Image: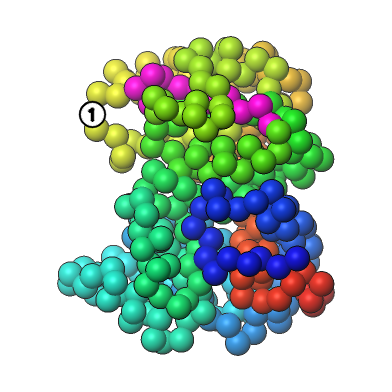
Amino acid sequence: MRFEHKDLLGIKQLSREEIELILDTAVPMKDIINRDIKKVPALRGKAMVTVFYENSTRTRTSFEIAGKYLSADTVNLAVSTSSVQKGESLRDTIKTIEVMGFDLMVIRHAMSGAPHYIARNTNMRVINAGDGTNEHPTQALLDMFSIREKKGTLEGLKIAIVGDVLHSRVARSNIYGLSHFGCEIRVAGPSTLMPPDIERLGVRSYYSLDQAIDGVDVINVLRVQKERQQKGLFPTLDEYANLYMISPDKLRRAKDDVMVLHPGPMNRGVEISSVLADSNMALVNQQVTNGVAVRMALLFLMMGGSRDEITY
Ligand code: NCD
């Protein structure tokens, strides 16, 4: 099976089989990361560029190293020191990059839909690395990979997504992905941070954290997106933490072997307690490693060949 899309703009566009293809391909990729010599020639002669109009530590770096482990030439456009600051339009910036011969662009933008616009206007393949509050497909893929690795399956799990659902592209991409696997998906948070029509996505929404995490296998904790909020969505961060911070104490209602995910960057003491973040119940660091494997898989499927052609 091949990845048939030119671009990866959202999990919404993927079938269950396509998600499984990416996750299955990420398994041997993770072995490469764990080797002493972390390089295979799979994408030699291919070129990719990351263009991040919003800040990033994990996503941008992991795309870059994923490309390098596969021998692709990888360039990062530093938007803050580029001609974007002289007023160059998005379209002109993209065209300029395209004519240098890049095969694939990884783009993050504050505006929902920006990667879709770019994809329509370029021959390069495009991967959405987060567009506004819309989608963050590779984060959902690495979350699903991390859950599957730990629990053995995604099938039928009870999963709570907790926090700033309104502004979270991570939540939306996770919901689209997990819906293919018969999971019971619950979302929880203050009413001001809950999209009114969220249940249309097939999830149940809760304002009570205790009810939401009752008997769950997985809790995915969202970062409070201070930069996307107008003032006044909740009284204070302390108040938010009192009601919604996930701590070891709160986890007593969940399954004994509950796993806690957080996409990073964490606001310790706001949405997740520091003790929990540093405990082995939280998979924050494993998620980052898995992010490299999943992005290697995706780059390989999009720029390389089929899974059988991987050179070990
Ligand atoms: C997420 C993002 O940028 O959407 N971070 C990430 O990619 N690891 C989540 C967030 O910033 O809250």
- Residue nearer the viewer, 78 or 299: 299
Numbered range of the magenta stretch: 183-193
Other-residue count near label 1 (Cα within 10 Å), few / some / many at <14 / 14–19 / ≥20? few
User: Which residue lies at the image location 21% right of the left edge and 73% below the top edge?
Assistant: 88
Q: Is residue 209 above or below residue 120?
A: above
Within the magenta stretch, is there residue 270?
no
List the residue tagged with mark 1. 231
Asked whether the viewer can see residue 265, the reply is no
Give the quarter of the figure containing the C terminus. Answer: bottom right
**Residue 56's spot in the image, x, y percent?**
43, 55
**Residue 192's spot in the image, x, y percent?**
34, 22
Quarter of the image for residue 234 reads top left
- For this view, does 274 lie left or right of residue 87? right
**Residue 212's spot in the image, x, y percent?**
58, 17
Quarter of the image for residue 46 reads bottom right
User: Which residue lies at the image location 40% right of the left edge and 75% below the top edge?
Assistant: 122
User: Which residue lies at the image location 45% right of the left edge and 43% below the top edge?
Assistant: 169
